[in-house]
Image (cartoon, rainbow, N blue to C red):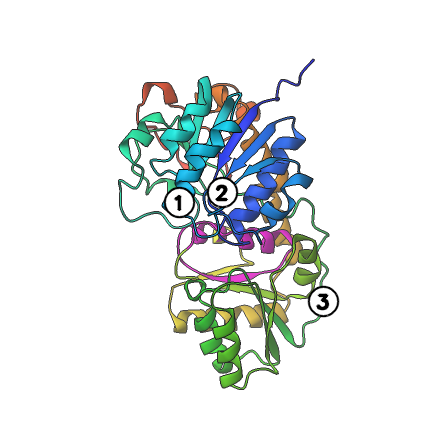
Amino acid sequence: MASPDHKRVLISAPLYANGGIEAHLFNLCRLLVEHGAEVTLVSRYARRRIRLVQQHRQIPIRLYTTPFAESGGPASTLWATLAWPLHLLPRFDVLHTLDVSPFVNFLALFLKPGGYLIGGRAGIVPAVPGFVEPRVQRKLDGFLVEADALAEKYQLDIPISVIPHLGNVRCAAERQRRKVDELQVLFLGRLHADKGIFRLLEIWPRLNIQPARLHFHGDGPERASLEQAIRERNLLSRVTVHGAAAPEELPAIFDRADLLVLPSAGEGLPLVLMESMAYGVPFVATDVGAIRTLAQDNPDVSVVPLSDAALQFGIERMARAIRSGQIDGRRLQQYHRERYGYDLVASRWLQALLHPEEFWKGGGSEEEIGRNAVPATSRNRRRPRLVAEQDRGSV
């Protein structure tokens, strides 16, 4: 007898870099397959070096791109409309799309009658209210975002529910206390100016935290410029640029780190901060997107205004707290487990995509459908009531 969770799931998303959303998609595909789903991923924009592209057969999932996927554009879209129909039948039970362009109208043709079309968005909330084309919005049965603080900013006439992204950490070793002499400061992510890498480098010589060393782990369009800036400032002895970190390298990287810094100009709810907490490493991050929610009742992290002065003050204060023993890595790990633990978040993704008929109608108990399911049914197109944080639980 087939598993009750056996569903055919189609996921559509651009794959730009080995960043947080791509890591989430890798983990989400693997999770769905582990629970009996047949998963197909399509992408009109996908770079060959992306982990999900290179390792999709190991999950295993089906992956369809185009010969023009490296650059995307009209040629890639045309190829997709001509070639993909050969691969997208029989039809799917669920379509989850992070691409909410008019192309969704084409993909929706491959849903079964009564199938669910679930939109989503990662990162910065678009400034334009009508970023979802009206015909697409009318087709959507629900919309997933990373945090309550982001959900409140979306103006959509469809149910919205909140589920953080799936990180690479299923179970982390307990953080061990240690005496800190040379402070090991970590930046982990895409090397792009919007991530604040040059802001961090600019204030580094002024920071009153020595002895300390800064490690950039990542890759991206600004890597060469970052390395040149380090040389020009004669910081090679104190700042190192490493390559992009593979998931299996994260335990060792975080074990060596004393502090993570994320000075971004814009974010949603960054996966790297979740992973930092999972490993018991405190962070200093700028107050953008929904990051401030991670500091609620959490004395082991710091969220500061988006300015050089505030960032410098926050790092110096956190460095003193680390060296004086005020920061408790195990307490931070417990905070993460209770609010953003892998099992907790994974169960909500499974409900949203494998049991959408219950999740999006708000039916069932909290244990069955997760604490954040919206009560409004997607079928009547009513704007959902966004339930207050205290009524929904922490995740």
SS under mark 1 = helix
**Closest to the observer, 279 or 50:** 50
The three-letter code of the residue at mark 3 reads Arg
**In the image, what residue occupies the spot 47% across and 61% down?**
285
Q: Give the class, few, some or many, for how many residues have Cα within 10 Å of label 1's Cα (few <14, many ≥20).
A: some
**Observer able to see residue 14:** yes
Q: Nearer the viewer, mark 3 or mark 2?
A: 2
Residue 84 x, y percent position in the rendering: 48, 32
**In the image, what residue occupies the spot 56% across and 24% down?**
8
Mark found first going from the N terminus, 1 or 2: 2
Q: Confirm or deny contact between disc 1 and disc 2 (CB under 8 A).
A: yes
Q: Mark 1 and mark 2: span between their CA atoms?
A: 9 Å
Identify residue for label 3: 178
Callout count = 3
SS under mark 3 = loop
Q: Say if 216 sits above or below 64 in the image.
A: below
The three-letter code of the residue at mark 2 reads Thr
Q: Mark 3 and mark 2: span between their CA atoms?
A: 50 Å
Identify residue for label 2: 66
Mark found first going from the N terminus, 3 or 2: 2
Q: Say if 380 sits above or below 152 in the image.
A: above
The three-letter code of the residue at mark 1 reads Ala
Mark found first going from the N terminus, 3 or 1: 1
Q: Say if 187 sits above or below 391 in the image.
A: below
Quarter of the figure that contains the N terminus:
top right
As drawn, the label of residue 75 is 1
**Closest to the observer, 126 or 108:** 108
Q: Nearer the viewer, mark 3 or mark 1?
A: 1
Q: Say if 229 sits above or below 167 in the image.
A: below
SS under mark 2 = loop
Q: The magenta stretch spans which residues?
A: 267-294
Q: Is residue 275 magenta?
A: yes
